Amino acid sequence: MVGMGAMIGAGIFVLTGLAADAAGPAAVLVFALNGAVTAFTALSYAELAAAIPESGGGYAYVKEVFSEATSFLMGWMLWFAYMIAGALYAVGFGSNFATFLGMVGIDVPESVSVVGVTVPVGATALALLVVVVFVALNALSTSASGGAETAVTLVKIAILVVFAAFGAFAVETSNFSPLFEGSALSLLPAMGLTFIAFEGYDLIATVTEEVKDPEETIPKAIFYSLAATVAIYIGVVAVAVGTVGADQLGRAGETAIASAAASFMPTIPGLGIGGGTLIAFGAVFSTMSALNAVVLASSRVAFAMGRQGQLPGGVERIHPEFGTPLRAVLVSAAVVLVAVVAVPIRQIGNLSSLFFLLSFVVVNGSVIRLRRRRPNLSRPYELPFYPIPPVLGIVLNLLLGLFIDPIIWGMGVAWLALGGGVYLLLARGD
Amino acid sequence: MRVIVVGGGRVGLETAATLDEQGHSVVVVERDPDRCAAIGSEYVATVIEGDGTDPAILSQADLDRADVVAALTGDQSTNLAVCLLADRLADVRTLLRVTGAAGAEAFEDVVDEVVYPERVGAMAAVNGIATEAVRALEEVTGALAVLEIEVAADAPVAGRTLADVSLPHGTLVVSDATGDRVADTDTELTPGETYLVAAESDVTEEVRQLFRG
């Protein structure tokens, strides 16, 4: 449920506006096609996760299959991708929470002008606050994060279903024509942008420890969450576009779903608040739980890397009193906080998507390499039609990567170069 | 630590599960496909299906990165072949499961560690059968036994401190009655209480008489 928890909800609340802005009404197709592309990678994850009983997700598998340097870069990418996703969710939380407060009658000053530059003070402050709270929870206790995840996920799904059900009656089909703004190719950059919404496979794989009968349960967990996620995404985006139109969604940015809901949800009897407020609450709630999941995931990756001697500074140390990898959590948190303040949301989404795309390429590559080098490995789940799915996974993920902004590639390459430097320094230290 | 367990029978699987619980990374090499599926279901180790004495199979277990190779099949010759092969192919510690006590010492020069699981199992069974107040905790290699002994009311040492009693050479009382502290000369051997005592095998009977009367 953790993987689905991270995929469903936050991604859709935060990214719908961005997708609508980039692709117009075809945003619906963007999520559907991304689902199709990730399905190939999902097969690869299922095969690897069922055969290799290690928690730590993609990093753990790559560590099994590739050289030290490759596994380092994989961990380095995933670690960053999770942290950046954390920043995205924090920003999404901040603006949605400000909207929510506005709906229940508390005004947050949206922005102030500093030397001619508009700074969204209220929302950013809220974003930073929520990061601090969840880092503190993750730093102080290992159990704070895991337990309620199933319930939280069900609540998120329920809220989205309510949204889609009510909205379905308010959909005006005219909002879907023309489906494409410009050429159909404009879908591709939007797909790259919203790819982050499908990071959950890695999370599922990151937390699979106490599993019995992995040959059944792991593929099921991965495929069901993919199917459910895609279905819910398509329903919600279709309703959002159909009710308020892509232009308005695009303008609303990371609060798109909440503002769409405000346009058609009836007032809840007895409470005297609009149904839109409920959806805004859902957005707040979802971004919060997704933030929690990625803070956990990023610190786990850092911790796993530290254990292999691939990160310096004692991130592999478990704090004696709290029983958590405190340093790993704190280091991750610092990066998230910086990203919240310093990087615009679109860049954040793009950068994280780029790294997830690249890491999915490596995961697909792992399947192929493992099949070649260890033909006798017992694979409780074997993906069908090998080698077509992993090869398609690699090609399609790279294709989407090509449509990501060169500036983002620049930032990505810079981070990888920094990683290369760290790796060489550590190697020399040995 | 990264451990390769060759042989996924009862001993091999139990070993893999325990290592996994302790946070180690385990690869099991097993010949029988059904057995491989069963081990896969436990989700404690990566499984390589094949004969561990075949270099092509053993190297698929990623021998270069392994710290230890434990040959735990029910066949001693197979285990020896695995250990020798692993030693030849990579720089790893080797552990050999023997199937009989006779001549087991001779292998200690060839491999790094020798285990005889049936012996440990027998010890546990004897402990379960024995109702008397002396229990061997675990078989320790060499001649040393670690015993849990309850002091009998009429025993020679009952009610005296360790300074006052003279235990045979080769005996060490490890912990006091509460089990919280390491014993010292002031520790009193109270009747009815249980003590942890290490003794060399030639004096265990004497120790038993001193504590039990």
Image (cartoon, coloured by chain):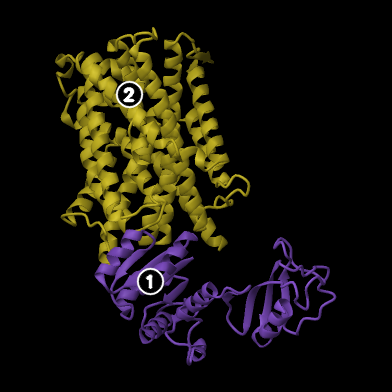
The colour applied to the residues of chain A in this rendering is: yellow
- Of A41 and B136, nearer the camera is B136
Evaluate whether label 1 is on the same chain as label 2: no
Which of label 1 and label 2 is nearer to you?
A: 1
**On residue B10, which mark appears?**
1
Compared across the picture, whether A406 is left or right of A166 comes to: right
The colour applied to the residues of chain B in this rendering is: purple
Compared across the picture, whether B137 is left or right of B50 comes to: right
Judging from the image, mark 1 belongs to the subunit labelled: B
Q: Is residue A211 above or below residue A89?
A: below
Identify which residue is drawn at 42% across, 15% down: A99
> Which quarter shows the C terminus of chain B?
bottom right
- Of A410 and B130, nearer the camera is B130
Is any part of residue A104 visible from this angle?
A: yes
Three-letter amino acid code of the residue under disc 2: Ile
Identify which residue is drawn at 51% across, 28% down: A130
Judging from the image, mark 2 belongs to the subunit labelled: A
Identify which residue is drawn at 24% across, 50% down: A43
Residue identified by numbered label 2: A159
Residue A31: x %, y % from top left: 24, 32
Residue A357: x %, y % from top left: 31, 43
Is any part of residue A407 visible from this angle?
A: no
Compared across the picture, whether B136 is left or right of A124 comes to: right
Q: What separation in Å lies between label 1 and label 2 (alpha carbons)?
A: 49 Å
Residue A291: x %, y % from top left: 44, 33
Three-letter amino acid code of the residue under disc 1: Arg
Q: Is residue B107 above or below residue B56?
A: below
Identify which residue is drawn at 63% across, 81% down: B144
